[in-house]
Image (spheres, rainbow, N blue to C red):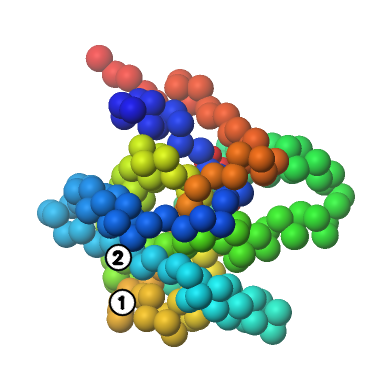
Amino acid sequence: MNVTEAVKARRSIRGFKPDPVSDDKLREILEVARFAPSNCNTQPWHLTVVSGEARHKLQEAIFAEINAGKAPNPAFTPGDQGLADVYKDRQFQCAMDYYRVMGIERHERDKRTALVMKNWEFFDAPHVGFISMPLDFGPANAVDVGIYLQTLMLILVEKGLASVPQGALALYPDPVKAMGGVPEGSGILCGLSFGYEDKGERINDVIMDRAPLEETVTLIS
Ligand SMILES: Cc1cc2nc3c(=O)[nH]c(=O)nc-3n(C[C@H](O)[C@H](O)[C@H](O)COP(=O)(O)O)c2cc1C
């Protein structure tokens, strides 16, 4: 698989088989991902992968917070806040495409909520990663973390695995912190659930389109 093939094959996958990824395979992937570039080679990302029993306990702890009505307390402003204009339109289209594939009508609020809640079930993936960076770092450093995230997702594809990046996993950081998943002085930017795709899951049929090149690229000569 070449890079173009990996980029085109990667999609957000939200239905997984329960089979875990072997430790050896996971290490092999993480060893490659660390070659992602960063400003002054600062490598400001930190990844914590939670699997097995700890993953199930974490899900329970996050749901305990949600069910107790605890307000989300992300370390950084979530990417879906305050969207307007074309960005709002694209966010709306993304949600509509998602609901259409899942057979959910706009007025079916409970079903929509249930779908959102799947974020904190890690979409049944056997592994969930949390990517953090130092709290006093800003957007320029977040670029590095984003590059790391995409590098990791592409290697996962190359190795026959699937993933979904999740800003939602930054919203309830305390249970992750309580299990030592966030370095002192850092905050979670996003999460990444991953494992082997369950191709029989309808949720994996969502295919997101992209804006035409002219909308997002300017070529000057
Ligand atoms: C930083 C980031 C955060 C995201 N957060 C979520 C999330 O919380 N929940 C979710 O289901 N998808 C999330 N996504 C997935 C996007 O919805 C998805 O990447 C986009 O719709 C394009 O679809 P594709 O990944 O299948 O190409 C996130 C993606 C990124 C890059």
Amino acid on which disc 1 is placed: Pro
Q: In the picture provided, is 142 more to the left or to the right than 128? A: left
Q: Tag 1's secondary structure?
A: loop
The residue lying at 59 percent from left, 45 percent from top is 198
Looking at marks 2 and 1 on the same chain, the residue that comes earlier in the sequence is marked by 2
Q: In the picture provided, is 215 more to the left or to the right than 208? A: left
**Residue 182 location in percent, x, y?**
36, 75
Tags 2 and 1 touching, CB below 8 Å? yes
Picture mark count: 2
Q: How far is disc 2 from disc 1 in space, using C-alphas?
A: 8 Å
Under 8 Å from ligand 1: the CB of mark 1? no
The residue lying at 65 percent from left, 60 percent from top is 118
In this rendered view, identify the residue nearer to me: 71 or 66.
Answer: 66
Q: Is residue 107 visible?
A: yes
| Mark 2 surroundings: few (<14), some (14-19) or many (≥20) residues within 10 A | many
**Residue 25 location in percent, x, y?**
32, 52
Residue at the farthest top position: 221
Is residue 170 positioned above or below 123 on the image?
below
The residue lying at 29 percent from left, 18 percent from top is 220
Q: Is residue 93 visible?
A: no
| Mark 1 surroundings: few (<14), some (14-19) or many (≥20) residues within 10 A | some
**Residue 180 location in percent, x, y?**
37, 81
Residue occupied by mark 2: 46
**Residue 73 location in percent, x, y?**
53, 76
Is residue 150 positioned above or below 26 on the image?
above
- The quarter of the rendered structure image containing the C terminus is top left
Q: Tag 2's secondary structure?
A: strand
Residue occupied by mark 1: 183
